[in-house]
Structure formats: structure tokens, C-alpha cells
Image (cartoon, grey):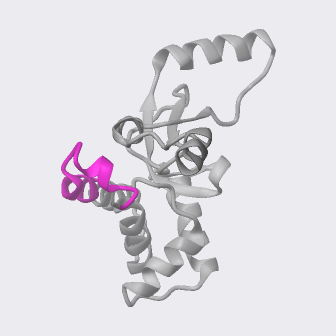
Amino acid sequence: MTRTDAHTKDHDHGQCVAGAMSRVEECCARKGLRMTPLRRNVMKALAESHVPLGAYEIVQKLSDAGDPAPPMSVYRVLDFLVAEGLAHRIESRNAYLVCAHTHDDTDVVVFLICERCGLTREVGSHAIGRDLAWAARAAGFEPRQRVLEVAGTCAHCREAASAAPAPAAKGAAKETAGG
């Protein structure tokens, strides 16, 4: 099972990819920006994965698909997608993920990152945003970026772990072998 299989059972992945591609095309049309083939291909590679991808992983995916691109060009496209609010950079992973929501300046973007399979979900929380804004004002601080990364274990990995047979204890194995 691939890292994204667990997520695809929860939703229509084809619709997810189509929605992401539609958002980038609408954004480019609305702002008069060019939707180049490379921008389309990088966005598609990101949209097809619910696991953050590094630039070199994207370069490899493009190459495997017969559309090779130099790493610096991929980095420029990623910078464009992040600047336009179409993708996020996951700092702790030095990787990128399609933006699943529309955000305003006061929103806090929360990423729930599974430490086992890498599945990353973007969720919003007005309560966290409100509390963060209050704490920042109280400290005389102006946040540049409001992103929170939360590491843990996704439901699928927890279910898989609880369904897996428990490994035999080392002491029990020795007793059986010796006795």
C-alpha cells in the first residue's frame, strides 16, 4: 500500500486533483498570469500526492512522466505556487503540499503530519487563529506567517498498528527455544 492509499479511501481522489488543478487555472486567469506547462505539471504532481513532496521528488516524478525539468525551474514554480496561495511549504520536511483551502491574513494554517506514513492534512482553526492573534498582540509581535505543524499518527496508521499482531516478547522466544 502506498502512502496515499489510506487517504484515497476517504475521498474521491480524482475530484481532489481536478479541484486543485481548477484552482490554479482560475487563479492564473483571474490575475492574468501564464499557466505554463511546467506550472501545470508541478501542480499536478503535488495534487496527486497527499504527502508533502520535495523539489527533487517532483523533478523525478516529472522525469518519470516524460516531462523532465531542471530543479531550479521546479523551485521557481514552487515559489510561484506558494506566493499565489496555491501550495504550502512544510518547513519541517522541506517539502510542498497543495493548499486545500482559501486563507485570509488572520487564518492559521494547521498541518497534521503523520510520522508513520507522511500523510499531511491541512485544517483550519479560527480558535487557534484568534488565540494566536491575541498572544502576538500582547507580546507586541507581528507574525509574518501563521503556520502550525503538528506531528502525530493518522487514523489509518493507528488502525493498522492496532490490527497488526503484537510481536513476541524476546524473553518468551528464549524460553520457548530453550525449553
Q: Is residue 31 above or below residue 138?
A: below
Q: Nearer the viewer, residue 46 or 119?
A: 119
Point out residue 171 in the picture as x, y percentages from the top left corner: 62, 39
Left or right of 39? Residue 23 is left
The quadrant holding residue 38 is bottom left
Q: Is residue 65 magenta?
A: no
Q: Nearer the viewer, residue 163 or 152?
A: 163
Residue found 41% across the figure and 85% down from its top: 64
Q: Is residue 56 above or below residue 69?
A: above
Q: Main secondary structure of the magenta part?
A: helix
Point out residue 113 in the picture as x, y percentages from the top left corner: 52, 41
Q: Is residue 8 magenta?
A: yes
Q: Is residue 172 above or below residue 178?
A: above
The quadrant holding residue 166 is top left
Q: Nearer the viewer, residue 152 or 157?
A: 157
Residue found 55% across the figure and 20% down from its top: 129
The quadrant holding residue 143 is top right
Residue found 36% across the figure and 55% down from its top: 4
Left or right of 25? Residue 107 is right
Residue found 33% across the figure and 38% down from its top: 163
Farthest-out residue, right = 140
Magenta residues (range): 2-19
Left or right of 21? Residue 41 is right
